[in-house]
Amino acid sequence: MVDWSGGNDRGATPKKDAIWVCAARDGMAEPPLYMRNRHVAEEWITDFLKAETKAGRRVFAGFDFAFGYPSGFGRTLIGTDDPFAIWDWFAARVQDDPKSNNRFDLAGEINAQFPGTGPFWGNGLQRDIPHLPRKGLARDSHGMPEKRKAEEQAKGAFPVWQLSGAGAVGSQVIMGLPMLARLRKTFDDALTTWPFEPLSTPIALVEIWPSLIAKNIAATQPEGQIKDARQVQVMAETLSAMPAENLAQLLDVPTNTEGWILGLGHEALLTQGPLPPPLKNDCFAMPQGAHWTPVETALDHLRHELSCVTGTRNIPLKDAANCILAADVTAARAHPPAPNAAVDGYGFAGPAPEGINRLPLVQGRAAAGAPFAGNVPADHAIRILTGANLPQGVDTVVLQEDVSATTSHVSFHGPIKQGANARKAGEDMQAGQVILHAGRKLTAADLGTMAAAGVDKLRVYQKLRVGILSTGDELRNPGDAVTDGQIFDANRPMLSALVGQWGYDVIDLGRAPDNRDRLRVILDDAARRCDVIVSSGGASAGDEDHMSALLKDTGSFALWRIAMKPGRPLAMGQWQSKPVFGLPGNPVAAMVCALVFVAPALRVLAGGTWQTPARYMVPAGFTKSKKEGRREYLRARIENGAAVVFPSEGSGRVSGLSWATGLVELDDPAQKVAPGDPVAFLPFHSFDA
């Protein structure tokens, strides 16, 4: 997406009212790029399109200026309203240098060919220009419509004739059409333009107007970011994430010579599922004076300060396992849709009185998928199978094991209550009823529930992309040659597997050396590819704790000294607006901190609700004396109905993680645990279950 400009070179420092470009794929955008002038921008756009087509990818390229003029303009100017002929006419006459251009003079020359004052106005130069008024006077003398049909429908859109002043777009058009004409010549048969041509080529040019999604842009505007940069980013993310059927609706516009604004008339589709606002820069900051932070205080802080950081998409039901709902799901129809039999047996109109009941049988039967079409008279019965709709005249079923039947009659003992062994229509779910709420992480059972209610598509949050990074010169990959001073990296495969089990997309960021410049490059790359970064090592405040040092420079850094064992130091902050969790380097401490803090935090960042792990009070199968002032997590498992703990509490014993099936949680006060005392056991699978 391109935010164009009709002005001159804006200098090396990014500025508003300049050219901004942003590329996105699948709803995930690269950082917006500042282009100081049109020459730089056109060169970058051309190179980008060449690289993308060479890689076999298609490009949907949007530009925020009009692709055409009101009908009749071209016929008066050059004898045809063919938009491409108009583009070529401007390309042959526009003179454009970084510091100057002839747009105002050219507009005056065009006006001279029209009756009256001509359509263009808004001379923005100090010198007067023949035939180009400074204000839009006598607007009906030139014979041209004031606006294209698109601008007439788009509330607040300015006419293409105005060249200067607040909101003016005319200069962008004059200085943009030559660039589009050159792109057409460069890419020839590989490029088509909407709505003038069918979009069947690798490159599609479309006209955009970010004001259509102004509310989404404003709601997600980070503090300090230039609005022009934000609007191309939001537009790129919105269109690249849009389901194909929605995009097809936006493109369903009749071919015409004026052009059209993409999404005009379909604003609801464009604004559907707005991108979430960024996290506050100080979201991890604890109150001043906090030194040793209790676990519950830290968890409460995360619960209240974090919010979703990913966009939304529509998906089919079959692909929804482990996704998080972005909108409530309502039943498409009742379940069951009609009254039906709960058992195999015989149906009749209840109740049945005490004693022996003998009823004549009607011909035929009712089965699931093959309902009985007739009516069952009073004091008659019909053969019915499990799941079959109850025929007219039937509201009760007697179990087949409880009857004696012949070809003509059925006998059974009463009493039987009216409605026995029968299900009511909608007793499980009613049509239109909310059956699952936004924020829920979908299970296999949820998919069954939705399918039973006729739900085939749903809106979910895009899967959170979590980057996993290990830091430290001493680390090597398993299988590498090592010295006595080096260790194998256990954290990255462990944390990657853990995050993958939670249902998120894992991005392996590799190992970072103890080099601040190299770590900065890795984090820059991670911010482009990830929604969240989870690192281990370098989370304290020592000489080689470069992660903490870099986060501190962003102004978002918080070093939490958690009153817990194992664990304690957690470094948190944001890198280019992406949250970063810095875990301890010790694998046992890293995993415990990931379970306790990262699991619920990621769930919220992914759009879900805060999850508290299940705690089961079980008898202790161990003895323990614990000091006051910190919470302790012991690697544990259940044996013979009691929680037993790993023989060594030392965090250097990584094998204890494999031995355990969960954690015993001992709260902050001092306590002595004896065999048989109740303790809280937290199974590993209950974290983000």
Image (tube, rainbow, N blue to C red):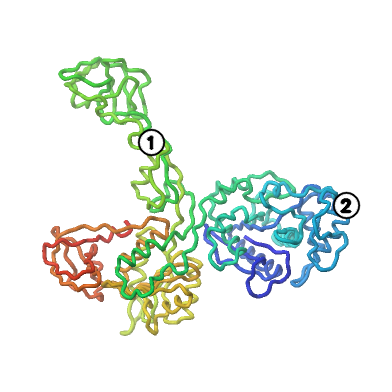
| Gap in angstroms between the C-alphas marked 1 and 2 | 67 Å
Q: Is residue 432 left or right of residue 212?
A: left
Res 343 quadrant in image: top left
Task: Name the image quarter holding the N terminus.
Answer: bottom right
**Mark 1, secondary structure of its residue:** loop
On screen, 511 above or below 227?
below
Q: Which residue corresponds to mark 2?
A: 116
- Within-10-Å neighbours for mark 2: few <14, some 14–19, many 20+: some
Where residue 351 appears, as percent x and y from the top left, is 23, 21
Res 645 quadrant in image: bottom left
At a point 20% along the width and 24% down the height, the residue shown is 416
Q: Residue 310 carries which label?
A: none
**Mark 2, secondary structure of its residue:** loop
Q: Is residue 554 left or right of residue 610?
A: right
- Within-10-Å neighbours for mark 1: few <14, some 14–19, many 20+: some
Q: Which residue corresponds to mark 1?
A: 430
At a point 24% along the width and 64% down the height, the residue shown is 663
**Which residue type does callout 1 highlight?**
Gln
**Which residue type does callout 2 highlight?**
Gly
Q: In this view, does 265 lie to the left or right of 474?
A: right
Q: Can residue 659 be seen in this view?
A: no
Closer to the camera in the image, 634 or 24: 634
Where residue 276 appears, as percent x and y from the top left, is 49, 58
Closer to the camera in the image, 244 or 618: 618
